[in-house]
Image (tube, rainbow, N blue to C red):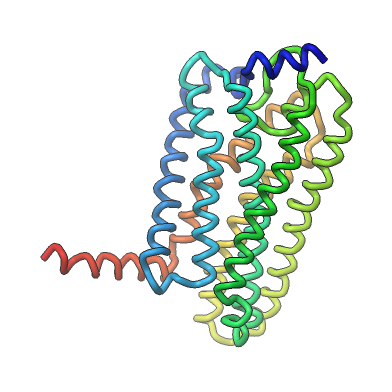
Amino acid sequence: MMKGENASSEGYFILLGFSHWPHLEVVLFVLILMFYLTTLIGNLFIIVLSYLDAHLHTPMYFFLSNLSFLDLCYTTSSIPQLLVNLWGPEKTISYAGCMTQLYFALALGTTECVLLVVMSYDRYAAVCRPLHYTVLMNPRFCHLLAVASWVSGFTNSALHSSFISWVPLCGHHQVDHFFCEVPALLRLSCVDTRANELTLLITSSIFVFIPLILILSSYVAIARTVLRLQSSTRLQRLFGTCGAHLMVVSLFFIPILCIYLQPPSGSSQEQGKFIALFYTVVTPSLNPLIYTLRNKDVRGAVRRLVGQERPVHS
């Protein structure tokens, strides 16, 4: 127990990250920095454009703005620290910084799981209940769904973060990951953590598997409705908006499922870091591209915004 107390009282952890591959660290630094800047620019672009253009004041773009803001916060909770660790020999993070990172990374990741369900319901209502869409997705209900997503994420994270803070951490301070996460910190414990692992398994089922089932159910209903449509133009439009969301869902959930389904071993731990790097760094940078490329609404909004600005300069 004394070692556990020392671990937190000394006030730091060492994030091993990718130190097993020192020759890769410079390459990873450059790639991650590029993806991070792309994430910042792309997601800020969506948030600003959705706010400025009245035509984008719809439930879909309201939730998309929430997703963009969430991705900005999610990447910022871990990527700057990772870049600092990759750049120099120092790979430490303070105990308070580690607990803060753990809390926000878990909260934002959980929030995204719930928010993607909300977005799939929005697409279901738009396609399967078009006549009732404005009633179903009224502004008050949309704000309620968004708040519920954020509250559920931060509540779930508060549960795990408080449990972790009570677990005595002993021995070395080396966290075998590039950011502070629950399983990596539990491996430092010198007591039985089966209760923590069971709690993590239950909440993971609630916030990963159940959302995935709900999303897939929504798209099965959407597919049935779309196949009954006769208009090819409407079909293309529906596949455009729903296809983008389904691609974002795949990029987010598939890496997470790969981590949960792989057997616990030394090699899988190293693979897990690269999989986590994908959904932490790559996926948030691709989301804006997926939603904006070939999107007529966004292209129209940009043209209107530029058109409004031109007379000011003339």
Q: Is residue 268 visible?
A: no
Single out the residue that lies furthest toward the left: 314
- Vertically, is 8 above or below 220? above
Q: Quadrant of residue 266?
A: top right
Q: Quadrant of residue 46?
A: bottom left
- Vertically, is 43 above or below 216? above
Measured as percent of width and height from the top left, residue 8 is found at: 69, 19
Give the position of the N terminus as an image quadrant.
Answer: top right
Measured as percent of width and height from the top left, residue 207 is found at: 74, 52
**Front residue of this view, candidates 152 and 175:** 152
Q: Is residue 249 visible?
A: yes
Left or right of 25 in this view: 55: left
Residue at image location 48% in from the left, 24% down from the top: 84
Residue at image location 68% in from the left, 16% down from the top: 9
Residue at image location 62% in from the left, 61% down from the top: 246
How many circles with numbers are drawn on the protein?
A: 0
Residue at image location 40% in from the left, 66% down from the top: 298
**Front residue of this view, candidates 232 and 132:** 132
Measured as percent of width and height from the top left, residue 35 is found at: 46, 40
Left or right of 79 in this view: 132: right
Q: Quadrant of residue 106?
A: top right
- Vertically, is 287 above or below 175? below
Measured as percent of width and height from the top left, residue 200 is found at: 80, 41
Left or right of 243 in this view: 314: left
Left or right of 262 in this view: 249: left
Give the position of the C terminus as an image quadrant.
Answer: bottom left
